[in-house]
Image (cartoon, grey):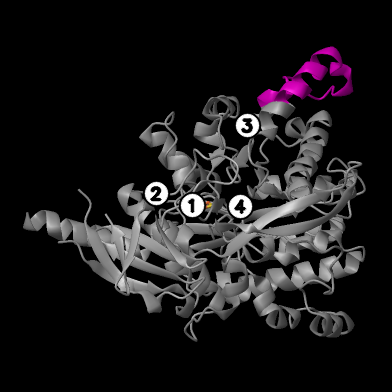
Amino acid sequence: MSEQVLVCRSDELKEGAVRLCTIGEVEIGVLRHKGSCVAYRNVCPHQGGPVCEGVRMPQVEDVIDENGLFVCQRFNEDDVHIVCPWHGYEFHIDSGEHVIDPKVKLKKYDVVEREGQIYVAI
Amino acid sequence: MLKVTSNRDVANEGFNSSVHLKNAAAQGESRNYDDFMIVDVDAHHYETEAFSEIAEYIDDPVLRREAKFQGMARGGIASMDGSYQEMTGRITRYPERRGEKVPPQPHRDITLMYRWMDALRVDVACMFPTPMLNIVTCPRIEVEVALARAYNRWLCDNILESENGRLKSMLYLPFNDPAACIDIVEKFGSRKGVIGFMVVATHYRSVHDNAYMKLYAMLQERNLPLAFHAAYTWSDKQLSLTNRFMAVHALGFTWHNMLHMTNWLVNGMPERFPKLKIIWIESGLAWVPFLMQRLDNEFMMRSSDAPLLKRIPSDYMREMYYTSQPMEMVNNPKALEVTFEMINAKTQLLYSSDYPHWDMDLPSTIYDLPFLDEQAKRDILGGNAQRLFNLETTLAPGKHERRAQRGVKAAAG
Ligand code: FES
């Protein structure tokens, strides 16, 4: 049975921000992205970096035309990643899966927002 | 009932290396790094932040003025090519480290070095510059020489001399000027904290050129290792065909060292200088088995091309030293295990972090390898370097404190 632990007031976590909280021995990052919240353990599966403290970057794409010619690069703002600040591993913000190898993934926690408060389910 | 016991708002914290690396410190605790000495044979500082101090050490007043005016960053006195090594903001310590607060004493670079070393549980680190590694590609040789002398003097006077034995360096040799290299070994070879000399691999003069023999003999006689520190340059004719940093880095950091290693062997340098210790830095490890196989195969058919060699090339390569980072370990542990066997890692491999660069490795990259026993882990993390460089046993003050606390707790029962 999971327990819901109060993290902070909803209005304390603005769009794009992260709140790091320690519950027991575990540090968890609660991130707000496009209005809703996700929560991950603040430990990267690569070498253990504080992944939730990283920047968010959209997927980079090479644009290739119908003849196979390179045109330019662009950002895909629909696919935003959490980037681990130690070495740059990138994870889809919604799933916590590494963008190339989904087996490499962040430890995810459920987040509940009710009555103006944010809770993490442990 | 579970409760939040600490709550951090990252946006308003400001950058601090100890906080950035606190997960590394936790790894150190769970793996008992306090019980043994860890030596990091390849770490860096950002001498750019002290460049105005370093520029004062340039002897030539005209160059000194130029250096002060141009600076050392991109577009600076020695720059050849731009790059985006810093991953356009993804690696947060690059843009944020400049704002890191330190006390007025000791020198900022000492404080910053200690902070990350303490987090990684590194006791002794061999420090190298960052942008100044690239002075090797400066087409004006006198600029390379002047900057090398200035940096080495500045480092010895301000960092190595004033520090209590945790910081070392293999000093930069301006390889494009063999006579200047000799002079630098003579002047700096016995300065405090100097444990060898280093050549940046992106140079365009063969390592077997007769002009270098006196240098090698001097280093051998003084028992000072010679290290080849890998690098890349987008100005290399072949590598200028690459368009992404990952490509120029993956190839460049191995290619230049492979070239020098091959020349070193084919020209019989291990037989000419049998006691000279050679270290290959920051090329990772995967290139070594490749080159061993390649050279052994050709040598058996064309031994007359390398008549000074009395054994196959890989036998000599197994007697050289390699730093571990960036260790290629994504998904093939078997290949890594074979690599360790082929290079005789238990005695020849030296842990290196390359901190604070983007592809740095923590001690856990070695400590967590399932095919090493405890002794091999400790040797690679410190023992091999301690023997190679003749280092005194040194533990960081934090390790002593934690060990004392542990002892007190154990005694209290
Ligand atoms: S620890 Fe996260 S990318 Fe390496």
Q: Report the Cα–Cα distance between label 4 and label 3.
A: 26 Å
Determine which of the numbered discs, if any, sits on residue B359 in the image. Answer: 4
Crowd class of label 1 (few under 14; some 14 to 19; many from 20; radius 10 Å): many
Q: Which of pointers 1 and 4 indicates the residue nearer the eye?
A: 4
Asked if marks 1 and 4 touch (Cβ < 8 Å), the reply is: no
Q: Are marks 4 and 2 on the same chain?
A: no
Amino acid type, residue under disc 2 in the picture: Lys
Q: Chain of mark 4?
A: B
Dot 1: what SS?
strand
Highlighted range, magenta:
B292-315
| Left or right placement of residue B330 versus residue A121 in this view | right
Q: Quadrant of residue B399?
A: bottom left
Q: Position of residue B386 (x, y in %)?
A: 48, 47
| CA–CA distance in space, label 1 to label 2 | 32 Å
Q: Mark 4: which secondary structure? A: loop
Numbered disc in front, either 4 or 2: 2
Position of residue A47 in the picture relative to residue B80 (left or right): left
- The chain to which mark 1 is attached is B
Decide which of B391, B243 is in the foreground and name it: B243
Residue annotated with mark 3: B319
